[in-house]
Image (tube, helix red, strand yellow):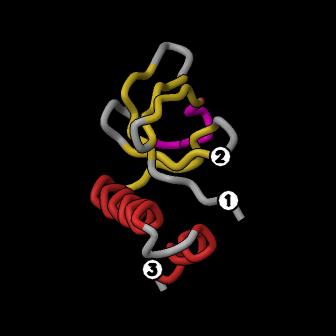
């Protein structure tokens, strides 16, 4: 199973490649597999350097918040890495 953190589109070039930001990390991805048009500010899910799906902005922000909460709990020692990796699934069941 692949778990993808929502990534915000920051730039799109003439070749349909985009610069996206994922939790503060920027990377370049290809948008060719997304049928609908994408624009700066949209959120996408990525797998191996290719954007696979455009997602709702509010859902993306909720997902990012959940990831950040898990990271904070792991960093504070409230949960260990194993629980953190499993904990995300429990938030949305």
Dominant secondary-structure state across the stretch colored magenta: loop
Q: Which residue is mark 1?
A: 2
Q: Which residue is mark 3?
A: 92
SS for callout 1: loop
- Left or right, 58 with reference to 63: left
SS for callout 2: strand
Marking on residue 47: 2
Camera sees residue 73: yes
Residue beneath the point at 61% across and 59% down: 3
In space, the residues marked 2 and 3 are separated at their CA atoms by: 21 Å
Question: Which residue occupies the foreground of this view, 39 or 45?
Answer: 45
Question: Which residue occupies the foreground of this view, 15 or 92?
Answer: 92
- Residue 20 position in % (x across, y down): 45, 32
Residue beneath the point at 56% across and 54% down: 4
Instruction: Give the image quarter of residue 65.
Output: bottom left
Q: Which residues are magenta?
A: 30-36
Return the residue found at the far top.
14
Residue beneath the point at 47% across and 46% down: 44
Q: Earlier in the sequence, mark 2 or mark 1?
A: 1
- Left or right, 1 with reference to 43: right
Instruction: Give the image quarter of residue 30.
Output: top right
Return the residue found at the far front.
77
Q: Earlier in the sequence, mark 1 or mark 3?
A: 1
């Amino acid at each position: 199973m692949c778990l993808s953190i929502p990534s915000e589109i920051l730039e799109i070039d003439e070749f349909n490649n985009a610069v996206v930001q994922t939790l503060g990390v920027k990377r370049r991805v290809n948008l060719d597999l997304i049928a609908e048009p994408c624009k700066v500010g949209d959120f996408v899910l990525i797998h191996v350097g290719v954007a696979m799906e455009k997602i709702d902005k509010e859902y993306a922000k909720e997902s990012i918040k959940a990831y950040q909460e898990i990271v904070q709990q792991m960093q504070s020692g409230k949960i260990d890495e194993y629980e953190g990796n499993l904990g995300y699934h429990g938030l949305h069941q």
